[in-house]
Amino acid sequence: MRSDLVKSGIDRAGARALFKSLGLSDKELEKPLVAVVNSWNEICPGHIHLNQLAKAVKEGILEAGGLPLEFNTIALCDGISQGTPSMRYSLPSRELIADSIEVMVEGHMFDAMVLIGSCDKIIPGMLLAMCRLDIPSLMVLGGNMLPGLFKGKKVDIGSVFEGVAMLKSGQLTEDELKILENNACPGPGGCAGMGTANTMQCIVEALGLSLPGSATIPAVHAERLRVARESGRKVMELFRKGITPSQIVTQEAIENAIRVDMAIGGSTNSVLHLLALAHEIGIDLSIEMFNELSKTTPQLCSMRTAGPYFLEDLHNAGGIPGVMKMLKPLLHLDVLTVTGKKLRENLETAKVYDENVIRPLENPVYREGSIVVLFGNLAPEGAVVKQSAVDPTMRKFKGEALVFENEDEAYNAILGGKVEKGKIIVIRYMGPKGDPGMREMYKVTSAISGSGLEKSVALVTDGRFSGYTKGPCIGHVSPEAMEGGPIALVKDGDVININIPERKLELCVPNEELVRRKKEWEKPQPKVKKGYLRFYSEHASSASKGAVWLS
């Protein structure tokens, strides 16, 4: 056992004494040490219940002969920080989470690991740690929040953000907004639609790193506790068989995960996280691969916010096993999973109970996958858009640029009625290095949607978007403005051509003029000059590379 290095032999008496100060015995210290990595806190609704899951996980580990020892990592709620400078910390927290887990696991030589998490950057951070450490591991997911009710209709957190814009445009009263606010989020779990939190939970299962069917179980269901206990037992089986993440997260498994992402209409943030995961494990995954797989993977689920169905609907329809059952002809079926079995074996018992929610390949929601990458002289390294959330009339769109240097300027202009139909809003200096931290701009996109402009106005940015974003919102433009990318050279009135079917994003300005503008361009001073964000801004890669740290 790895842990023998810290707890076995005469010369480790001091370490054993410290373990015994925790109340542990010599007999217990003979067992494998299993890290229970928990992101529980009292801030995030996606994490408030994870202490109960941790208890069940530890029971399962004890039953199977391991010694569970729990520690926590950080977890930031994107929804709470949304639309403020606090959102800068969201994406950079992914690296902190991965590093903190590495420090604790390697610093105490754990033999195996169960990670318990939910939400947007916590799951990706845990995935990076799993692959980096490569000890027997699996993930227990926090599950999804149930939707609320407002005027007899299901609602969620996205309804509230859009409701703010609807209030300011006269579509809601203050009293109605308060009722919506009080009822949209009825309890724990990741936000109820297919935002980034639930997208990443589904991707974890698609990768084979959590037990089948677990990604879509609502947070409040008792089934979550049963899965957590079984996961505790299962990690000991992985330990005894020597199965580690590097045997599971292969090129083929990542391709499977991308196809599932395309089929469920997942968040554009998944592109960042899958690129980062591939980088961590040493797999050469290019951003172009998302286009290749999108062309041949139909979207099978019409999930909130672009569609009518919530995660509880997907779960009742068959969950991710049901989605993968439908995708079976397109998947690599001989990949290994944490069950100890191959995907082919896991799918033998998968069923689809509602083909309105999980459609068959021959009757998709959309003939291609939900996410595509656009290229052109405005985005030489690519830009990302969820095409299935864009109205068909807006998938080819040409308009004049209206340029903003930050999110608040654009937001105030939209709500102030200063954005005319036919314009393309450009928000720049919002990338990994520029803001820094590449904050989401759901405040702006919900203002566009809530103001009824999503069929007449487009948005282009080097920042990123919430998984709840809908409409022609193009993010991750690379290279970013802070690196002198072409988006830094755009001026008010420049014509931009968006052609999603042909995967093009073009600035209709002569190349000679762009060369002249580039010579005149001066790199702005950093917005943040101290602390962790300054460090991140100096080390983050391009969004086209996953916004990972580079040495």
Image (spheres, rainbow, N blue to C red):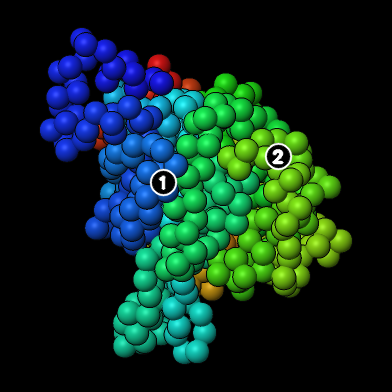
Within-10-Å neighbours for mark 1: few <14, some 14–19, many 20+: some
Residue 198 image position (x, y, % from top left): 51, 56
> What is the CA distance from the residue labelled 1 to the residue labelled 2?
25 Å
- Which residue is at the front of the view, 112 or 217? 112
Q: Which mark is residue 63?
A: 1
Residue at 16% across / 31% down in the picture? Answer: 20
Residue 119 image position (x, y, % from top left): 42, 52
Taking 229 as reference, is 200 left or right? right
Residue 103 image position (x, y, % from top left): 30, 26
Within-10-Å neighbours for mark 2: few <14, some 14–19, many 20+: some
Mark 1 vs mark 2: give the one in front: 1
- Which residue is outermost to the top? 11
77 is higher (above) or lower (below) than 341: below
Disc tally is 2
161 is higher (above) or lower (below) than 13: below
Q: Secondary structure at mark 1?
A: helix
**Amino acid marked by disc 1:** Glu
The residue tagged 2 is: 342
Q: Secondary structure at mark 2?
A: loop
Q: Give the image quarter of residue 307.
A: bottom right
In primary-sequence order, the first of circles 1 and 2 is: 1
**Amino acid marked by disc 2:** Lys
- Which residue is at the front of the view, 60 or 388? 60
- Which residue is at the front of the view, 520 or 408? 408
190 is higher (above) or lower (below) than 417: above
